[in-house]
Image (cartoon, rainbow, N blue to C red):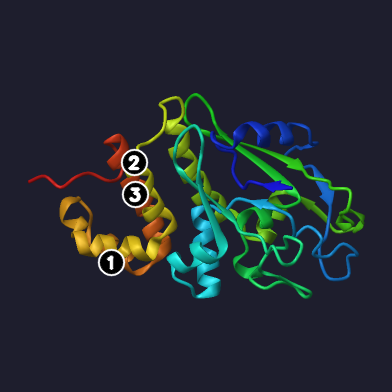
């Protein structure tokens, strides 16, 4: 089973076909679902997954585990690239000694529940996010019904809005969509260079090391960035991730709406 929290150019074709095969949930339309230890299939969906990890997923999982980025990647991740853009991609490494179970699942449930990935939060709602011709984000929602899942037999009723609020998904979507826009900007222009790919891997997936890079290279001396923003980037990984997206756009494409090189 594959879970991708954002529809992207490099992983798009299979995910898009899969989502189109599912019933779409219209705005305001309701569905019934619940997942808790009393549901007969509890934890069954937490194994044999092709689970993509977005940069924000990695940030939150590292926070839950109190783990440096390099150690997290070596222990829990498989690094690859989106095939038609070259941007880095990451998947969660499943536990080969336990029927390919998620390394964070226990009999009691998810051990990192408060920081679980966006795809886990959204399930069983599938979200397709695209950019229209004017660069505006367009969302569609689909209901993922798997044969083993008994959660749909519960009487608890949701809409896509109430489900997103309950699962605290907004910040995940915001960060994921920002990365998706970078990939869509590259679409049709070949692969980014290996040098840029490595730079992106550092900037968005290894925020602790990127903060060290900013200090070591005195990066802020080259940018028009106020002192409050500089302090936030170096002190807070969420602020650093936002900055990283803007910095990548500036370095690779030569422009960013909020970031500009300092004039000499």
Specify few, some or many for label 1: CA neighbours under 10 Å numbering under 14, 14-19, or 20 or more.
few
Quickly name the residue at label 1: 231
Return the x and y of residue 117 as percentages of the image width and height: 61, 59
Residue 176 lies left or right of residue 232; in this view the side is right
Q: Mark 3 or mark 2, which is nearer the start of the sequence?
A: 3
In this view, the residue farthest toward the left is 264
Specify few, some or many for label 2: CA neighbours under 10 Å numbering under 14, 14-19, or 20 or more.
some
Occupied quadrant, residue 241: bottom left
Instruction: Decide which of 250, 217 is in the foreground and name it.
Output: 217
Could you tell me if residue 233 is visible in this image?
no
Occupied quadrant, residue 101: bottom right
At mark 3, the secondary structure is helix
Instruction: Decide which of 241, 79 is in the foreground and name it.
Output: 79
Return the x and y of residue 170 as percentages of the image width and height: 58, 54
Quickly name the residue at label 3: 199
* 2 vs 3, front mark: 3
Q: Mark 3 or mark 1, which is nearer the start of the sequence?
A: 3
Quickly name the residue at label 2: 249
Specify few, some or many for label 3: CA neighbours under 10 Å numbering under 14, 14-19, or 20 or more.
some
The span from disc 2 to disc 3 (Cα, nearest Å) is 12 Å
* Residue at (28, 66) in percent of width and height: 231
Could you tell me if residue 87 is visible in this image?
yes
Asked if labels 1 and 2 touch by Cβ distance under 8 angstroms, the answer is no
Residue 82 lies left or right of residue 140; in this view the side is left
* Residue at (42, 28) in percent of width and height: 190
Q: Mark 1 or mark 2, which is nearer the start of the sequence?
A: 1
Return the x and y of residue 60 as percentages of the image width and height: 53, 65
- How many numbered marks, from 0 up? 3
At mark 1, the secondary structure is helix
């Amino acid at each position: 089973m594959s879970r991708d929290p954002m529809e992207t150019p490099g992983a798009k074709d299979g995910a898009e076909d899969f989502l189109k095969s599912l019933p779409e949930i219209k705005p305001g339309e309701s569905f019934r679902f619940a997942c808790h230890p009393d549901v007969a299939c509890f934890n069954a969906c937490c194994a044999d997954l092709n689970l993509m990890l977005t940069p924000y997923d990695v940030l939150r999982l590292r926070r839950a585990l109190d783990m440096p980025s390099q150690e997290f990647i070596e222990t829990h991740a498989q690094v690859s690239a989106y095939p038609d853009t070259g941007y880095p991609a990451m998947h969660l490494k499943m536990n080969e000694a336990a029927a390919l179970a998620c390394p964070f699942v226990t009999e009691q449930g998810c051990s990192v529940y408060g920081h679980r990935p966006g795809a886990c939060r959204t399930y069983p709602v599938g979200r397709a996010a695209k950019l229209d011709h004017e660069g505006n984000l367009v969302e569609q929602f689909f209901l993922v019904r798997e044969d083993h899942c008994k959660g749909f037999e519960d009487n608890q009723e949701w809409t896509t809005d109430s489900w997103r609020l309950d699962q605290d998904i907004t910040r995940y979507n915001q960060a994921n969509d920002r990365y998706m826009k970078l990939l869509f900007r590259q679409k049709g222009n070949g692969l980014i260079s290996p040098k840029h790919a490595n730079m992106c891997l550092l900037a968005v997936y290894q925020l602790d090391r990127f903060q060290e890079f900013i200090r070591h290279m005195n990066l802020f001396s080259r940018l028009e960035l106020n002192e409050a923003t500089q302090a936030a980037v170096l002190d807070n990984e969420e602020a650093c991730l936002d900055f990283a997206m803007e910095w990548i756009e500036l370095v690779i494409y030569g422009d960013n709406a909020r970031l500009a090189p300092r004039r000499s």
